[in-house]
Amino acid sequence: SLDFWRLLYALLKQIHGGKWTESDAIDNQIRFVKSALWYHGYGRPELYRLPSNGSAGSRELLLAFSWLLHRLSLLEQLLARNRVKTGDETSVCMCEDDLPHCQRGTTEIAPEYGLEDRVDVRYLQWLNGRLRFQWRSLHAQHQEQCKLLHKLHLFTSGSHMDQILGHFSITETDLVRQPENYKQLLQLLESETRQLEAFLEWKQLEPVYWQWMETVLDNMAEEGNMCESQDAHVEKSGLPKVTSCCPWADSLTGQIDRLSRDLMTLRDQLHELVTCRKAAWCEKVR
C-alpha cells in the first residue's frame, strides 16, 4: 500500500502543478492525498480513516484511483500537462492598459494590527493596494512578452516551411541559434510519444479493467453484508428476548398488526370509492 500512496501522491501533485520528490515523508504524502481527494469531492469515509503510516488500505486506494480515472479524466489531464510545446502560446488579456491613479499599488510599510487582534482597515487597504500593484506588474510583463513574441514572428516571417504558419516559434528559433539543443527536444518528444502509445494501449484494455473493478466492488459488497449480518447476530444474541423482559410486548405487537390490517382495509375501500366516483363523473361528462 505504500507504493500505492506514493503513486497517488505523484499523480495528484502533477495535477495540481506542484513539485514532488520521493524523499517526502510518507505521512505528508498521505495527508496530501487525502486532502486532494477531499478537495475533488471523493466522499468515501473509509479512505480517510486509513492510518497515516500507510500500513493498510490497498483496496481503498484502488477505489480512489479508479474514481480519479473516471471522474477527473486523470490520464488525459496528465498528458495535457506533460505535452511538449513546440509552438508559441499566449493568453489574451482584455484588461485596460491604464488604471486609475487610486488603483495603483504603493510600497508603504504595512500598518500594524489594531488592539485585541482586530484587523485595521488601513491594513486591508494596504493589502488591496499591494495586490493591485502586483497585478499591474504581471500585466506589464505579459504585454512585454507579447511584444517580444510579435517581434520574433515578424523577423522570422517567411522562413518556415509551413506556409500557413509562416514564422518560427521560440523553440525553433532557439534550435537555429543552438543546434545542439535538438537532442534534448528529441528526448522530450520521444518521451511524449511513449506516453501516447501507452495511453492508446490503455484505452484498448480499459474495458477489461472496469470489468475487474466490478468484481472488486461485488466482493466488497458481499463482505460488507457478511459483516452486517454478523453484527446483527451478535447484537441479537447479546440482548435478551423482548418477551422475557417485556410482558406487554406481545399484546402491543398484536395491536399493531390489527391496526395495520384495518388501515389496509380502509385504503382498499377508499380506492373503490374513488373509482366509482370517477366512473360516475365520466358518465356525466359524456
Image (cartoon, rainbow, N blue to C red):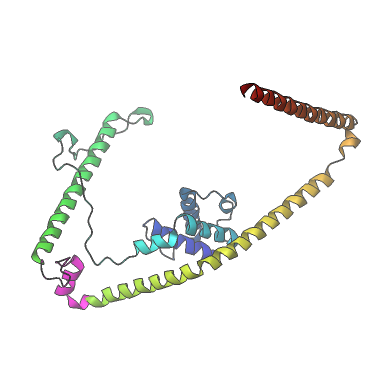
Occupied quadrant, residue 119? top left
Occupied quadrant, residue 248? top right
User: Left of 272 or right of it: where is 76?
Assistant: left
- What's the residue at 16%, 55% (across, down)? 146
Q: Is residue 53 among what the camera can see?
A: no
Q: Residue furthest top?
A: 284
- What's the residue at 82%, 31% (across, down)? 261
* Residue sitting nearer the eye, 275 or 95: 275
Residue 66: x %, y % from top left: 52, 60
In the figure, 201 relative to 266: above or below? below
In the figure, 42 relative to 162: above or below? above
Question: Is 265 in the magenta?
Answer: no
Position of the C terminus by quadrant = top right
Residue 273: x %, y % from top left: 73, 24
Q: Is residue 118 among what the camera can see?
A: yes
Residue 209: x %, y % from top left: 55, 66
Position of the N terminus by quadrant = bottom right
User: Left of 249 or right of it: where is 96?
Assistant: left
Question: Is 176 in the magenta?
Answer: yes
Residue 12: x %, y % from top left: 43, 58
* Residue sitting nearer the eye, 14 or 84: 84
The span shown in magenta is 157-181
- What's the residue at 35%, 28% (across, down)? 115
User: What number of labels is visible?
Assistant: 0
Q: Residue furthest left?
A: 155
* Residue sitting nearer the eye, 216 or 60: 216
